[in-house]
Amino acid sequence: MNIGAIFCSCRGEIDKNFSLKDVKEYCNKDEDVKFSEIYQASCSIHEQEDMFKKINEHGIEGLLFIGCSPKYYEKLFDKIFFEKSKINPGLIKFVNFREQLSWAHRDQKPEKIGEKAKFVIKAALEELKNAKPIQTEKIPNLKSALVIGGGISGIHASLALANQGHHVYLVEKSPYLGGIQLQMSKTFPRDECSACAITPIINTLFRTPNIDIFPLSEVIRLRGRTGNFVVTIKQNPRYVKEICTNCHECINVCNHNVPDEYNFKLIDRKTITLPRFDTFPKLPFISQKDINYCRIECKAKLCTKVCDIKAINLDEESKEIEINVGGIITAIGYDIYQPNEYGYGKSKDVLTLEDYERVLVSTGVFNGEILRPSNRETPKNIAFILCVGARQQNKIPYCSRYCCMATASAIKQTVEKLPDTKIYVFYRDIYALGKVGEEYIKESQNFPNVEWIRTVPEHFGLKSKDVENERDVLTLKINVSGGKLDISFDMVILATPMIPNNDIEDIREILGLSKTPEGFFKEADLMLAPVSTYDDGKYLAGTCIGPRTINESIVDGYAAATGISRVLSGDEITQFVTISDVDEAVCGACALCVKTCYFHACSIDKEKKISVVDPTLCRGCGNCVAACPTGARDLLLYPTESYYKSIEMLSEYKPPEGPKILGLLCDGCAYPAADQVGLGGKIFPLNLSIIRVPCSGRIDPRFILYAIEKGFDGIILGACYQENCQFFGGNYDLEKRIDLLKELLHSRGINEKRIKLLFISYLESEKFVKEVNSFVQNLKSLEMIV
């Protein structure tokens, strides 16, 4: 194989800690290396033109990129060099010299870093020589897209795609579009009526001809790949036909009440209902959880009798619809943390900020009047408490960012309606958003009847009823400079954080998306690809990625639409097929791969008695490869032989002191965590040599045995946390395999403590350093190191 080696100094960042020139000269000694060059910035379009020229001149078949982490440019470079130089993406390998070598060992002498770099290059060359070309194929590109979620972000994404000529299928689980924002009173910082702001946009959506809207619907199955996904949508019944004229007679005669979820269950509604705000579509509905009452318990069925046009059908059933799309945007929104602090749920007068919004809004609980839910009286004093449940490690560790501004908006509306009511605001810190955020919050602080107090109330007391006044008595214990005060309030409003949507796990499993430790969807890169996923045809938008304001969610929608439009721009898409492969001569049809595959891509051909792979379902995680007892399975992009060669070459490296450690790190979390060490100015010891795997489930126990045989003193197996694996269960399967492997090692007299299973998040660089250093010390204590 003719190999080209492209070294990038990253504008001097890499070779400032060791001599890149010396490593290049070492690389040139390999007889297969036909050209090597050091570039200042391999990501520069000008330097890439020189690369294309030299690659073509030397007839290069395989390419090494030695520079920054592959997380940045791997997909882009695979595509560019395939198009410009016809190099198969399976024969392009990336060597991480910046984050995991130069930066992570910045405390070491240049010659020591350079020595390790030579072995890393040697391993990379052997990996490339044993790599396999992957298949490439062209598939027709469908000019259509699916948007999941009809909130503010999904609506803007749908309109942006439709305006670019793409057909859009918009799926919304609830009966109406608009999301939670349509239920709110006003938007900050303009204090504009929330419904007035979003209604014209929804009107435009309904009038756009190339958008099909599916309310009361959910995605239940997905197959295929970018450019040609097959999506199954389950459309749930509304029990009211579109011929309905909105006469409201059915609602008027209904004599059964249920909690009103559109008013956050502060009041009841009729079983058949139409919310008072401007809904889209403007049709009543009956919830599926209430339909049994209508069908069985309700004997009168007055709603069906008063409807002259027979628009109500209590026997309507769900139906499934199959569509084909080229790309998918997920914008399913968020849920609100339901607190157990400060008596929430015990007193009607303790509300979340979202509950209080339904008190403020004119179509809400009390038609815009501010009244105590317990006795319908005007409150004389109100307490707002910020950060309830948030920024606490044992609850919600992050800040939702929007709460301070939303609280200021609620205060302004309260002062406008109740100028004589005393308002206290208890806070830890103030997060003022945007260009006018500081001014907006200061405006709410300057009202004469509003006091902002920087303290967190310690204690909440509730007396169920004041018998004389028929009201709840709410007491907060407040820390002040002179001591502690017990203050009674008529109402307490809790600003609580955004939390992941309750449906996020179901959507994640269907679409094959990754999740952060906080439970939100994980973007491909926090900075460089904030709405992308690991799949080119799937994008994210809005608060399903994390806490967002309205304008940030809108920007996400536009950004995701732009990404999908780029994918759908051509008539064909070139696909790199990175699926699992089967050696038919070795396969024994044991079906372990079938049981292991979380994507149902594996099956048994009963006639041939071999395992087969559905390329439209396979995600290329490699879990089945590690599970295969005969070695019949292999992964096209990460072949088994390449791993053995890399382990063998890295085993020849001897660190200056201490144990020799191999790290097999998953591409989703553990490998980026190692990157983050260098990025964050931290260091880990030279003892650790790292190999990247697509998923921790790809780690074959035979790799570990081979590493021990080759002289590694310890092996770190890096995996995502249990619920965060982008391939769902690879980390879980690895853990089971390692438990069995440890029993085998014990039977052979090998200390099982030489293997460390490390569950980690992609941003936990400090934990990574701590765990590696601890492992080094533990191995030393085992007295295995001479």
Image: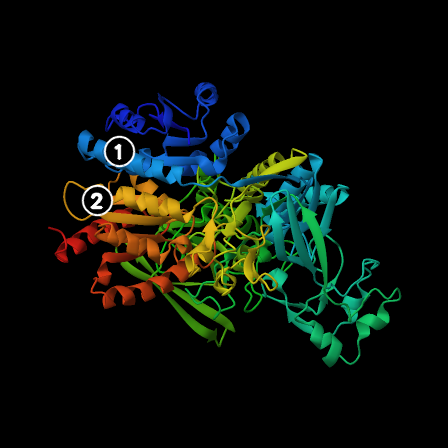
Position of the N terminus, as image quadrant, is top left
Q: Nearer the viewer, mark 1 or mark 2?
A: 1
Look at 30% across and 48% down and name the residue there. 663
Residue on which disc 1 sits: 118
Spatial distance from mark 1 to mark 2, Cα to Cα?
15 Å
Count the marks. 2
Look at 38% across and 47% down and name the residue there. 641
The scheme the figure's colours follow is: rainbow
Pick the front one: 99 or 339: 99
What kind of residue is marked 2?
Asn
Residue 305 to residue 42: above or below = below
Which disc is residue 687 wearing?
2
- Residue 750, x across and y down, in percent: 21, 62
- Residue 618, x across and y down, in percent: 54, 52
Are there few (<14), some (14-19), or many (20+) residues within 10 Å of tag 2? many
- Are the residues tagged 1 and 2 within 8 Å (C-beta)? no
Q: Answer yes or no: is residue 440 visible.
A: yes
Are there few (<14), some (14-19), or many (20+) residues within 10 Å of tag 1? many
Pick the front one: 575 or 463: 575
Give the mark nearer the N terminus: 1 vs 2: 1
Which disc is residue 79 wearing?
none
Residue 123 falls in which quadrant of the image?
A: top left
Left or right: 360 as drawn, with respect to 45: right
